[in-house]
Image (cartoon, rainbow, N blue to C red):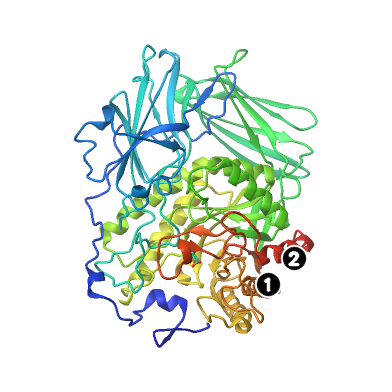
Amino acid sequence: MAEMTRGGLDMTRRQMFEVGAGLAVSASLADVAVAAPAPDTARSPTNPRFTPLYPHESATRTTRDLSGLWDFRLDPDDQGEAKRWFEGFDQARRIPVPCSWNDLFDDAQNHFGPAWYQTEFHAEAPSRDRRLILRFGSAVYRAKVWLNGHLLGEHLGGHLPFAFDASDVVRGDRPNRLVVMVENRLRIDRVPAIPDTKAFHLYQEDLPETSYDFFPYSGLHRPVWLCSVPAIHLRDLTVTTRRSGGGALVDVHVAVSGNWSGPARLTLTGGASPVEVALSISNGAGMATISVPSPRLWGPSDPFLYTLTTRLGTAMPLDEYTMPVGLRTVEVKGEALLLNGAPVHLRGFGKHEDFALHGRGLDLAALVRDFELLKWIGANSFRTSHYPYSEEAMMLADRYGFLVIGETPAVSMTFADAPDVIAARHKQLTEDITDLVSRDKNHACVILWSIANEPLTKPFHSLEPSPGDAVAKGKAFFADMFAHLRSLDSTRPVSLVSVQGGPVEWVSQGDVICTNSYNGWYVGSGRIADAGATLEREIRKLHETCGAKPIIVTEFGADAMAGIHAQPSEMWSEDYQSDLVAQYLDVLAGLPFVIGAHPWAFADFKTSQNIMRVGSLNLKGVFTRDRRPKETARMLHARWGRAGFNSL
Ligand code: GCB
């Protein structure tokens, strides 16, 4: 492994995580207050599991998007609940929903405590045969929701939807007041967590202090919907596809509210003629298989989507739900990843949901432009680094035919912390995995799950050595997470994204081995000539230790300041970034067990302030933050334009 020199010590990037670096640290750093708060017990008894189905409208369902300008008030002294702001609050300013609050108001940039949102809406008068559901696409990180002063429930964890049944509280005669408290305290027991600066001295300070390399944007990041569904309604659908000879079989599991029993129908359209199958629901559950004799299979070169309609009841449906379905299989066989039985190679990027002013708030224009640029550059894949992306992104990825690695929010999780802290993260990540799989299980685009990105034995940038039992603790933790995910979805491979290949006890639990590698940047800085040889040595070693499994190099690259050029190429120039990425691709293309390469990152993105990030930006994007191509983007466009389906 290449060496890097820091403060007179030679060390690899991995060793930077694992050993004390011996650099001077100011005494005051040890005193930086870390939130070591009372346990994060946000789940209230009123919070049922969310309704996973995306709120598509149908003949029996309506969905009202409550997006718009809402009232907003920061609550730095955490007085809102005591002062009963949930009944309505004054001194508000206006904020767009969805959006992050951080880049809109100067005093909100580094506000990670509670903030309050409120809006009003009119609704139909409640009736016994319909339910009104309030559904939130995502709130980062904890949300508490009141309607007309009544607590509907709470939710912990960002990036995933949650919903509350508001039927008993909604009124039809007057406007309804919806109040939401959102707080994003940066805590050691959350997912993702911050480093424990009481136990560890950090030789790099960040503002805000995070353990990960992106800005912890906060707020109501995705739309809020008011959904009206029949009292007896489709609660969930699980669609999996198999191949049988030249045909395809579509297995559909149906879950219905209220333990309902009765007849139902499935209709698949889009093929030569519609296929209809009857099934019976018993105590809220039913299952049927649709047979498609000459299927048009989904894949990057032909992302064809059929339409599946499910109807409850006979002639006049009690409930009806329509969703797009791609017919495809994915499996790991030996060292190959097979899509529809044929080996596939992933060309693409790690990305972020990040754009000027919106922060991490859903930005449909940025989403469409990103996917157009992915197509232009010749990518067929991306990873939802480092958290689940919006449902709209997943639906669009199905349509564009991208092969998506779906990642949880577990980035930079460390195993040097107290047992109760690790237990809290265990609980949260278990719930996140449950909700992520139930949200995204029906997307053809998701071909691999990533349980975590770069878990560490101890905080990055810390001086003290790792505790001796950290690797064993992480091994047990991830064994639980792999087992949990595999119990929820047996149709997709599962992985964990390691940093520079380690610890092998963690990453080797995956069906696909994913690793991030920064030779020529953090390791062997500027030594571009050595980067390829070092990479080849490391990846071959990883292959030997993890056994005959496919490998994806999920991150590599260099920061490049747009407009800076150098001959010969030097760090921070566009030329250096392009040369380094090309060198990685040349080496990886020669390794038959490497089935994917994702340069980091698609576009520049916002980070905390620190000495590594000019303008609080990570500049490893091959596009700038406003999506202008750097030299690397042109190089990849030319290279990937020539690449076949089965090459890097
Ligand atoms: C990594 C992380 C990613 C960072 C990147 C970098 O390994 O996974 O979140 O942004 O390195 O640029 O340092």
What's the mark number on residue 637? Answer: none
Residue at screen point 21% across, 50% down = 38
Position of residue 74 measured from the top left corner of the image (x, y, whole percent): 30, 42
The three-letter amino acid code for the residue at tag 2 is: Arg
Q: Earlier in the sequence, mark 2 or mark 1?
A: 1
Q: Which residue is mark 2?
A: 639
Position of residue 507 measured from the top left corner of the image (x, y, whole percent): 49, 66
Residue at screen point 39% across, 13% down = 172
User: Picture quarter containing residue 567?
Assistant: bottom right
Where 26 falls versus 603 (above or below)? below
Residue at screen point 71% across, 48% down = 299
Q: On the picture, is 333 further left or further right than 36? A: right
Q: On the picture, is 328 further left or further right than 6? A: right
Position of residue 478 measured from the top left corner of the image (x, y, whole percent): 42, 60
Q: On the picture, is 267 further left or further right than 440? A: right
User: Picture quarter containing residue 181?
Assistant: top left
In the current view of this chain or complex, which residue is farthest to the bottom? 8
Q: Which residue is mark 1?
A: 582
Can you see residue 648? no
